[in-house]
Amino acid sequence: MLPADWIEHRRADGEILGWMLASGGGFRVFDLLGRDRTPDGVADLEWLAAEELLEELGIGYLADRWTLRLADGTERPVRIAEASPRGVTVVADEYGAASAVGADPERFVLSFPVTSELVPR
């Protein structure tokens, strides 16, 4: 569930890029998975710097390969199928199977914001 105090940021074509949260004297930046993307060692960003960071992050990372760490300790290669404040859906992607025509890959629905169970590959 999207926190009520997060401020959405959209690019010029209307696509949402993420959110900003007022913090101290500035803002923290969150991507479409709800992960805090404010640079390490930076307490808060000014408004324009926060917007620029979201613009720079874009949405391309959603197409990357990810690893899903399951509760039993196993790891699965996955791709993100859908990301929204209602949840993040990933699909199993062993050997690139998620992209195969007619594939019906296993789906996993994660809560938003995602936790350390989903990591970049």
Image (tube, rainbow, N blue to C red):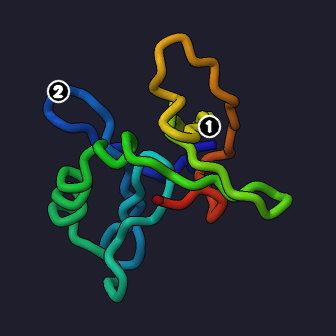
For image coordinates 54% across by 11% down, the residue present is: 102
**What residue occupies the far top of the structure in this picture?**
102
**What residue occupies the far front of the structure in this picture?**
95
Q: Which residue is mark 2?
A: 13
Could you tell me the amino acid type at mark 1?
Ala
Residue 36: % across, % down: 45, 65
**What residue occupies the far right of the structure in this picture?**
72
Q: Quadrant of residue 91?
A: top right
Residue 29: % across, % down: 36, 62
Could you tell me the amino acid type at mark 2?
Asp
Q: Is residue 22 left or right of residue 58?
A: right
For image coordinates 62% across by 65% down, the residue present is: 116
Q: Mark 1 Cα within 10 Å, few/some/many (few <14, many 20+)?
A: many
Q: Which residue is mark 1?
A: 92
**Looking at the image, residue 3 lies above or below residue 26:** above
Q: Is label 2 in a helix, a strand or a loop?
A: loop
The answer to whether residue 82 shows anywhere in this view is no
**Alpha carbon distance from label 1 to label 2:** 31 Å
